[in-house]
Amino acid sequence: MTINVMFVCLGNICRSPTAHSVFQHKVDEAGLGHKIYIESSGTGDWHLGKAPDPRTMRAAKERGYDLSALRGQQVKKQDFERFDYIIAMDDSNLDDLRRMAPADFSGYLGLFLEFGSGSEYREVPDPYYGEEDGFTLVLDLVEDAAEGLLAKVKQDLTERQLA
């Protein structure tokens, strides 16, 4: 049994690949890489097949995360059949995902920072048009929310094993 998690932002070159890599790191540290499958996508198609933004990669590398294998992809209708968690970085992308979701989607569809420990942020801000410190803020928010998400997914795994 596997739980499938997808992180979603607009272009899939800044926030969602950061979340993908950070969460993968935490999953692997917990020894759950064989039970939790992770992807990231964008709602837009501008960066299909492209590596994450160099500033994103640089900020992540400074904290020990490697995003070099990730490539931009776009959310597809079939993803609502494949993923148990589809997690948006902001309200705009969440609205787009809700419009795409079939009526019978039974997984989690919501904001990533709902899993955080209660920072003043509700959304992960898009650092693309900003300065370097925006990429650091994204990492701070993502690392915090990834802890809460991992706790929730672990709980789901336990409940599924007991069912």
Image: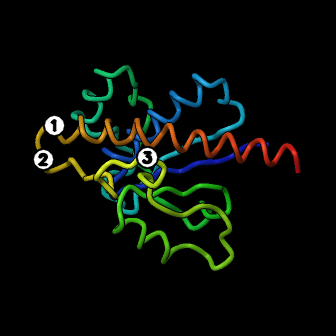
Q: Residue at x 20, y 48 (%)?
A: 128
Q: CA distance from mark 2 to mark 3?
A: 23 Å
Camera-near label (2 vs 1) is 1
Q: Residue at x 54, y 44 (%)?
A: 149
Residue 130: image x %, image y %? 12, 47
Give the structural element (helix, strand or loop) at label 1.
helix
Q: Which residue is mark 3?
A: 116
Q: Say whether disc 2 or disc 3 marks the residue closer to the N-terminus.
A: 3
Do the CB atoms of the residues marked 2 and 1 lie less than 8 Å apart?
Answer: yes
Residue 72: image x %, image y %? 40, 47
Res 54 quadrant in image: top left
Between 49 and 75, the one lying in front of the other is 75
Give the structural element (helix, strand or loop) at label 2.
loop
Q: Residue at x 42, y 44 (%)?
A: 117
Q: Which residue is mark 2?
A: 130
Q: Residue at x 38, y 51 (%)?
A: 48
Residue 133 disc label: 1
Q: CA distance from mark 2 to mark 1?
A: 8 Å
Res 132 quadrant in image: top left
Q: Amino acid at mark 2?
A: Gly
Quadrant position of the N terminus in the picture: top right
Camera-near label (1 vs 3) is 3
Res 63 quadrant in image: top left
Residue 122: image x %, image y %? 34, 58
Q: CA distance from mark 1 to mark 3?
A: 20 Å
Mark 3 neighbour class, 10 Å CA radius: few under 14, some 14 to 19, many 20 or more: some
Q: Say whether disc 1 or disc 3 marks the residue closer to the N-terminus.
A: 3
